[in-house]
């Protein structure tokens, strides 16, 4: 396997199984990332195991994905806290608590690999499933 690696970030940019023609993988990288130059890349032969490590997200990448998901959940319930929300004060307070629990997700022990998502107000609790989610068990895209 041949890989084109960004030398600044260390990230895999493109790859192919057959030996590429001179400059082919770097040319492919430059098409995908026009603000870069040839000097930003190196082509090297890697093993299948090394290839898999490039595909495995780093802890920082996983944390960014979880935060983006959390931010989307916060955005989806912004309406609950506006002055003209149709919710009564009790429901508004429940949503405010939920929103704070979402903000606190990154502070949980084990973040980002293991976390517990708060339950949205009004959701029925299902005692047959475990609330704790391992990032290995959750498909976050």
Image (cartoon, rainbow, N blue to C red):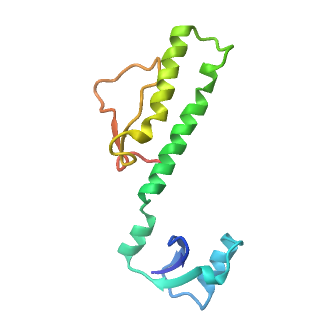
Q: Residue furthest bottom?
A: 22
Say which residue appears at 50% left-offset and 49% top-offset.
65
Horizontally, is 111 left or right of 40 in the view?
Answer: left
In this orientation, does residue 141 appear?
A: no
Q: Total label count?
A: 0
Horizontally, is 61 left or right of 110 in the view?
Answer: right
Quarter of the image for residue 52 reads bottom left
Say which residue appears at 38% left-offset and 45% top-offset.
111
In the displayed structure, would residue 1 be above or below residue 134? below
Say which residue appears at 51% left-offset and 38% top-offset.
70
Spot occupied by residue 43 in the image (x, y as percentages of width and height): 53, 84
Q: Residue furthest right?
A: 34
In the displayed structure, would residue 110 be above or below residue 20? above
Say which residue appears at 43% left-offset and 47% top-offset.
139
In this orientation, does residue 52 appear?
A: yes
Spot occupied by residue 17 in the image (x, y as percentages of width and height): 48, 80
Quarter of the image for residue 138 reads top left
In the displayed structure, would residue 105 be above or below residue 52? above
Q: Quadrant where the N terminus lies?
A: bottom left
Spot occupied by residue 105 in the image (x, y as percentages of width and height): 43, 37
- Nearest to the observer: residue 59 or residue 5: 59
Spot occupied by residue 109 in the image (x, y as percentages of width and height): 33, 42
- Nearest to the observer: residue 79 or residue 21: 79
- Nearest to the observer: residue 42 or residue 125: 42
């Amino acid at each position: 396997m041949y890989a084109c690696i960004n030398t600044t970030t260390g990230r895999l940019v493109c790859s192919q199984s057959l030996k590429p023609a001179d400059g082919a993988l770097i040319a492919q990288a430059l098409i995908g990332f026009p603000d870069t130059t040839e000097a930003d890349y190196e082509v090297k032969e890697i093993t299948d195991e090394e290839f898999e490590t490039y595909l495995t997200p780093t802890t920082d990448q996983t944390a960014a994905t979880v935060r983006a998901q959390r931010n989307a959940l916060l955005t989806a319930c912004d309406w609950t806290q506006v002055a003209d929300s149709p919710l009564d004060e009790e429901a508004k307070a429940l949503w405010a608590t939920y929103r704070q629990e979402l903000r606190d997700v990154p502070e949980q022990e084990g973040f980002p690999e293991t976390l517990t998502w708060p339950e949205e107000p009004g959701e029925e609790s299902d005692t047959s499933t475990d609330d704790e989610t391992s990032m290995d068990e959750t498909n976050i895209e």
